[in-house]
Structures are given as structure tokens and as C-alpha cells.
Amino acid sequence: MRIAVVGLGLIGASLGLAAREHLGAHVCGWDSDPEAVPAALALGAIDSGAGPLAGAVATADAVFLAAPVGALPELAATVLAQAAPGSVISDVGSTKRSLCEAVSDPRFVGGHPLAGAESRGSAGARGDMFTGATWYLTPGPATAPATLATVRALVEGLGARPLTIDPALHDRLMASVSHLPHVFANVLVNGLPATDSELAVGPSFRDGTRVAGANSELWSDIFLDNRVALDAAIAEAISELTEVRSLLQRGDRDGLRRFSDRAAAARARISR
Amino acid sequence: MRIAVVGLGLIGASLGLAAREHLGAHVCGWDSDPEAVPAALALGAIDSGAGPLAGAVATADAVFLAAPVGALPELAATVLAQAAPGSVISDVGSTKRSLCEAVSDPRFVGGHPLAGAESRGSAGARGDMFTGATWYLTPGPATAPATLATVRALVEGLGARPLTIDPALHDRLMASVSHLPHVFANVLVNGLPATDSELAVGPSFRDGTRVAGANSELWSDIFLDNRVALDAAIAEAISELTEVRSLLQRGDRDGLRRFSDRAAAARARISR
């Protein structure tokens, strides 16, 4: 089994580690940054990495694209032109609708593992990054059933739980559970009072802002690619925040209690 | 050294455990709920707990009030009327301005440890709850310097880092670093799409909403007591969220990048 990983950042390098450890695959890596290849080799994330993109891709049974979402449509087209007829191609991007609309090929299925960290680059890569994680797969009308089955088996082999979902529904979900939380984390830290001294914050602030300011280049891409769903999610949030302001101004204790009680009930649905 | 803890919930019971373990104090507990006393005794959080409030307080060298913030002004007045002349009285409430305006006594200094958990009740109490935590102290004009010095030494003995601050500034800070994060956590989970199936969420959502729906009675009290500062913090957040919407609608990649970069710089000030 030969796997090509295109893009050797945090997720790409972790995918390489996991594919070597859990699937016993030969992993060939490629990155637009020439320094990323020796770093990934040193980590043991890839077996080989020299040469042009076409070489890495042409002999692979499976290709995973792990580049920023803004680069994925063009990269997918390039890779599909070079990949073998019997191979499968997937990606690990945080948004799916625009990519899955742009790519129409039986060998391609979109993918998105719910994994990561606030660090960037391959240094934080871990072979168990995907263990137990949900890994969304978003087949389009052109995706061959055999492609979906193969990628699903690979994802399971990497230790993740594959979950098939419509690309547009995926993006609306992500606006709520990932992109809006990132926006909120940024807003929370940007609202910190200006002081010269160290700011003492409690555990809820630390946890709620862990992802604040994470990799601004990558995230501005994600925000923009999912702008319609994210804009709607922010609008909904503003509307609820406005209602909270009015509860505060009216001194409405019961209303504030109901606001928290609804949250407790909603959170119970996602706790594990 | 005899310490009275009035209110035996999560923080009160942890305070009792810490005072017995770290200060070797005799801890006398009281709670308006009669079932809380045997539970705290069983936990080892208090040495004794029978009898009326006056009995617990009259013989104590130090009294800590660990009741919900809405109950504190009246409770403080009751306790100060019963406490000995040479004793000190403090509290652990999450808001300070209204209490410190209501209480004018040389024996009293307001306090607030930045510690806690999303659980409630004494069952989650831990003797190391305050180890290394910031513990705000908010002396008012009436607070005797000796009271502040005594409570400061007790707080250090419990393992925390005392930090003296103006009560109103404390409440503005808390609006930003604690109360707004709680509101955001509630808004995030309340915005989850309605689905029948299990919702797959990533680590950033799980961390960002850990406190969602926490103890609605206690938090509606806190929100209301700090309503002016919290309302201002929400208004500021709405204004930044509105700006993010406009960046998304304009497709302004550089603006979104600056939004994240500002957050990265702000977060660097609080990371440890």
C-alpha cells in the first residue's frame, strides 16, 4: 500500500505517521515548502519525499491532500490529472462544499478529520492524532462507491470513525461547532482590558480561548471559504447576545436562568 | 486557629479541606441546607457543623462566606453582627462591587479565588482547589489594614496567590475574563443545529463550551450582580462580531487575518 501525503504540516505529518504506524503503508510526502520534506523524514512521518509532485502521486494507491483550504481546488485538479486510474484521492480540509462542487471525479471523495491542535507545522505531529476522532467523508454525485469504501477503510485503519455527510450540511455544522468557536475565542481575547501587568484569568477563560489567534493564514482561508454559513451563525449569535443584554437591562433573573438551563440541556447532547 | 465556612458547596467544602490540610485549622461549617453539613463532615471538609450560624461564627478567628452572590450582602451583615471583635470576615463571591459597597466594617475584606469547576455541590471538592490560583482581595475604605494582612496570609496558606484590586475594576475584569466567556459558551451550545443523531464536535468546541449551562441559579445571580459591566462587554463583543460579518461579506482576507493576528498577540499576554 503506497500513500501519498501532499502538504506536510501538522495534519499531513500526523497522517503520515499514522499511515506508517497503523497501516504499515509506504508514505511518500510532498510539500510546496522544500524544507518541510526533510523535517517530515526526520520525524518518521514519511518514507520518501524527494522529487516532483507528479512522481509522488503517480504511483500512489491513495493520495491525501493536506494543504490550506484555499489551495485545495487547484491542487486537487493537478493531482487528479497525475494520479493512476485505480487510485483514490481525498483531502483533510476544514470546509467541504466549495471543494466538492469544484471537483467532479469518481476517484475523489472529500474528507475532514475533527482533529488538530493550536500549534502549526509538523513538529507537533502525532501518530495517534486521529485515534477515536470523527472523520467526515463527503461524497459528491461523481464519487464512485468503491472510492468511498476504500477511503472509509483507510480512515478506519488510521483509528478514526468515518461519518458520511452532505458537503453543504457539513459546512453548516462546522460553522456552528468549529468556525464560530474560533471567532468567539478571538473576540474574547481581543476584548481583554489593556493593562501593563499580567492578567489573571480563570480556567474557563483559558479553555474558551485555547484556539484564539491560531494560524491566521489558515483560518482566514477557512472563514472565507465558509463565509455564508459562518455569517449566518454569527448573525444568530448576535441575536441571542442582544436578547441577553435585554435580560440584563430588565433584571430578568428567570430569563437568565432559562438561558443557562437551555445551554445545560443542549450541552448534554454533545457530552461524552 | 478556628475557621468558619458559611456555605458548603463546591468552593466552601474545598476551602474547608484546604484549611484543614494546609493550615491545620479547626474548621466549623454551616449551610442553609441541613443535608450539606453531614456531607461535608463525611468528606473531611469540616471538623464540626452542628448548631446555629451564630455558634459557628462567634468563636471563629476567620469566617469565609461561600454562598451565592445574591445572598452575600445580607449574610455578611448577619455574620458581622455575630462575629468576635478580633476576627476577620471574607467571602469567595465572583462579583465584588455591590458586596463591598454594602458592607462597611473594619473586619471585612472581599475576596474571590479564580478556581472552580463546572460541577456543583461538595462532592467535587478538592483540598488543592486553590493551589497556585489567583485569589483577588478587594479592600474597601472601611477595611482595617490588619484585616487585609490576616486574610492575605490565610489565602497564601491555602496555596493561592493573593492579589489586591479595586472592587469595581475587579468586576470589569471579570466581565471580560469570566462572565462573557460563560455567556459565549451558552450561546455556542444554544446555536447547535437540531439533529436527532449524536453531534460530532472537535476539541475546540468541547473546550470552549466546558462551562456552558453551569449551575444556572448561581450564574444568573452573578450575571445580574455584574450587569452593568457585563452588558458593556457584550455590547463590545457584538460590535466586533458585526465587524467580522462585514469582513466576511466583503471577502476581506487581510482584514480576517488581522483579526486573528490581534488575537494571537492578545493571547500571548495571558498564556503561561
Image (spheres, coloured by chain):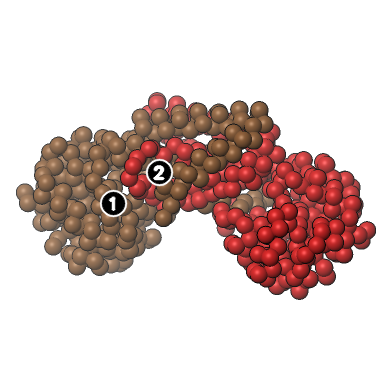
Chain colours: A red, B brown
Q: In the drawing, what numbered circle is on residue B178?
A: 2
Q: Amino acid at mark 2?
A: Ser
> Going by the picture, which residue comes out furthest to the left?
B85
Marks 1/2 same chain: yes
Q: Secondary structure at mark 2?
A: helix
| In this rendering, position of residue A202 left or right of residue B108 | right
| In this rendering, position of residue B126 left or right of residue A109 | left
Q: Which residue lies under the disc numbered 1?
A: B135
Q: Earlier in the sequence, mark 1 or mark 2?
A: 1
Q: Position of residue A223 (x, y in %)?
A: 64, 39
Q: Kindly tell me whether residue A120 is visible in this rendering.
A: yes
The one nearer the camera, A213 or B223, is: A213
A8 versus A77 height, above or below: below
Q: Quadrant of residue B59?
A: bottom left
Q: Quadrant of residue B9?
A: bottom left
Q: In the drawing, what numbered circle is on residue B185?
A: none
The one nearer the camera, A75 or B46, is: A75
Q: Could you tell me which residue is drawn at 25 percent across and 52 percent down?
A: B162
